[in-house]
Image (spheres, grey):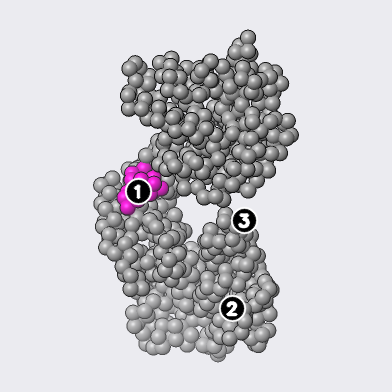
Amino acid sequence: MSAEPDGPEDRLRRFATIWSRALYPVTATSLTRPEFESQLLPLARQLRQDLAERVFRAADCEAVGAALVATHCTEPEALSRTLDVVDAYLVLYCGEEAEPDEAGRAGGVGEREELRARCSRIQHAVAAGFARALRERTRAEQEAISRAALEARGTVAEALHASEARFRAVFHGAAIGIGIADLEGTVLEVNDALIRMFGGLEHQLRGRNVAEWTHPDDSPHVWKLYEELVRGDREHYRVEKAFYRPDGTVLWTNLTVSLLRDADGVPQYQLALMEDTTERRLLNLRLRYEATHDALTGLPNRTLFFERLEKALAAGESARFGLCYLDLDGFKTVNDSLGHAAGDRLLVEVADRLQSCATAPGEMVARLGGDEFVALTTGPDTEHEVDELAGRIMHALSTPIRVEGRELTVRGSIGIVEGPAAERGAAEVLRSADITMYRAKHAGGNRYELADPEADARAITRHGLTTALPVALERGEFFIEYQPLVHLGDGSVRGAEALVRWLHPQHGVISPDRFIPLAEHTGLIVPLGRWVLEESVRQARTWEAVTGADQAGLPLRVNVNLSPCQLTHPGLVSDTVEILERAGLAPGALCLEVTESALIGADDDLLKPLRRLAEMGVDIALDDFGTGYSNLANLRRLPVSVLKLDRAFTQGMQHFPADPVDLKIVEGIVSLAHSLDLAVTVEGVETGAQADQLRELGCDTAQGWYYARPGPPDRLHELALADAT
């Protein structure tokens, strides 16, 4: 076996070789196979370019399909083999330029899934281009035949008037079917081509009446045109018409009927010219099927589903619809553990089960892609029917599926949208179903949920905030408020915690609990956190210049929160050092707050940057202490100098007498912290009773609305100056 090609060009040529070997046996060409391969090479290069492009250009892929027709690859098998080759080998040989995934691995799972999705769209576009080019070629052939037919009509008319011998020569030698009937519709003459088209028996055609050749697919205007012609009101007409052959099979034709007049202009005969289009029609139907059905499961694909959904939504104000949007839970695990072949077999079995659930009139099932399916129902009582349909689907999935000797338990999450047909568009309906499906998945999966307009609006708002986050940082829409940290012993201001806010142009001020999770999810938390650190350090330097040291001879300290993403960022230490040096602030004036949950089970690699910062003199505070499940013994190995008790410990101290259990817990934590040389800060102090209790328990500093709400940095100047006086 030969080695794999090394470079991209070698891999491209290997792909072109596989493609040419698949197409050459079904291509009518005088070229040798290497010559034919050289014609396919630029098309393969175009497909590789389309696969690598982030912006999908359907026109380029359609041009590849059209080029196949131009190289005489016009057999239906040529398209089928092309689609098979593209599906099996395009990503394998032409996907080497994939960008690294989030883990830094080239060609990661996310990128591979994206390449597979893009490859599927390339296949659809190539098929569309092939069909369009074949249709245009067919149209050109039809026009040539039409011209020949018109010439034949003139020739036949001249032959009737001038020479019977010449007429017979043209009539019987024509390549298209020709028939002559009188004005009553009785067939008088048929040529050999027409006889062959109808099965080869002349007596079954001659003497029959044209009116007998009706077909269920005839449109009403066909016979209306015929009546106008025999009355002499029309000279000719052309239609697509189906006929039944004597054996019961269907013959599809392009039919041109002309009126023949005598020398005085009196209507005398009908002349019918027929072109057999049966094979072409079957090819078009096959292309249409392949373009609208999923190749793996045979279910309708996204294209056909949208056509049906748009038709259902346009059915009128009295019509209703119901839609179930299904996503399999944990399907990625099947692919990762058993391979994509096993995943494909699982999808096929799921598709069969879904198909058996939607057999009633007005119901259909489609595969949108991956492990996402939809089921649509229409009718007057869809509010009840869609619930039953979802129940049937969940029941059908409850039976394990056997794949490669293993019984796999299939779970699915379903989002249901139901309502009047005329209120929303197809895209809006599918978006609502998708959002609802994810709501069911986040609720634990293996369930279905009904669409909720308010939940949809919240999800859309979250998406809007997510997409607006990067631009917001560039536009300077974020600002920082500071909440004072007060020493419980003398009531002096020792510093402040920096709390970032977002001033959104439409939504106003947005609190961190709404956008910080989004920033962490998108990775924007790293540049946002760096900006917060820069601004806070600069502000601390300003305080130091204005107020100097506090009563203990220490500068006002600024506390800045670090997210788990920032802890793992390799530039944390260098960025912090650079920011402190540029601002001219001593490390002791900065405290970085890290949540307890972020350090639970932390290894030495995660703690190393925090240790380096602590060795420089930066204080490290363990935030929200007491809310997690960390081992208290681990405090010895953590480079922290401050414990920040969560506000949950202060809630029981709002009224006198305080909850004795809370007092004992706080007293124990404070004693433990002080024995480890750790200071204790308490959050959420809202009353004087809480402050007194915490002071008696030995807590060092506190913050909360009792002292001041978060506000602009100038207010901290005033508080600090007031303490100094």
Q: Position of residue 618 (x, y in %)?
A: 62, 35
Residue 645 against residue 341 in the figure, above or below: above
Residue to which mark 3 is pinned: 55
Residue to which mark 1 is pinned: 444
Q: Residues within 10 Å of mark 1 (few under 14, many from 20)?
A: few
Residue to which mark 2 is pinned: 19
- Front-most of residues 628 and 418: 628
Q: Which of marks 2 and 3 precedes in the sequence?
A: 2
Q: Residues within 10 Å of mark 3 (few under 14, many from 20)?
A: few
Q: Position of residue 547 (x, y in %)?
A: 67, 17
The residue drawn where x is 60% and y is 45% is 609
The residue drawn where x is 68% and y is 43% is 574
The residue drawn where x is 46% and y is 23% is 698
Q: In front: mark 3 or mark 1?
A: 1
Q: Which quadrant does the C terminus fall into?
A: top right
Cα separation, mark 3 vs mark 2, equals 25 Å
Please provide the residue range marked out in magenta: 436-451
